[in-house]
Amino acid sequence: QVQLVESGGGLVQAGGSLRVSCADSGRTFSTYAMGWFRQAPGKEREFVAAISKTGGSTYYSNSVKGRFTISRDNANNTVYLQMNNLKPEDTAVYYCAAASALGSRSYRVFVSADEYVYWGQGTQVTVSS
C-alpha cells in the first residue's frame, strides 16, 4: 500500500525558492515512478515533473524547466521538488503521485495523470508578486 503525504508548501515572494517533499509510509516506494502535478484555482490539474523509479530519468513541463528540480531518496521513501525563481503563476496546490514501474514500465517517466494510481492530499504553494 502506498500512502503519500506532501509537506513543505507555503508562502514565498516572487524570485524565491521552496522545496516540497512527499513521503511514502509503505515499503514499495522504489518500485514506483513518481510525479508532481499542480492545480491552480479555476484551472485543470497540470503535469509539473516526473522521475523514474531509480531516479535515473527525469522530465519537466516547459513552464518549469530550468527552475524546478525533481529528485528522490529511495532509502527514505521520499520524493522532492525543489522550486527556484518562483513566479506568481506557480501558485497552486501541488500533488505528488505514484505510477507503477514494474516490468516493461521500468525506468520510464510518466506525464499523463492517468498513469498514476496513488495521489497525495496536496500542499499549497503561494507566490506573491
Image: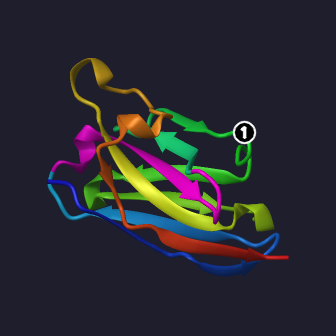
Residue 33 location (% of width, % of height): 36, 39
Q: Is residue 54 left or right of residue 1?
A: right
Which quadrant is home to the N terminus?
bottom left
Residue 95 location (% of width, % of height): 46, 59
Say whether residue 46 is magenta: no
Looking at the image, residue 44 lies above or below residue 31 = below
Looking at the image, residue 31 lies above or below residue 120 = above
Identity of the residue drawn at 40% across and 27% down: 108
Identity of the residue drawn at 28% across and 58% down: 77
Which quadrant is home to the C terminus?
bottom right
The amino acid pointed to by label 1 is Asn
SS of the residue under disc 1: loop
Circle 1 residue: 62
Q: Nearer the viewer, residue 56 or 22?
A: 22
Identity of the residue drawn at 28% across and 32% down: 101
Q: Magenta part of the protein: which range?
A: 28-44
Q: Image quarter for residue 76?
A: bottom left
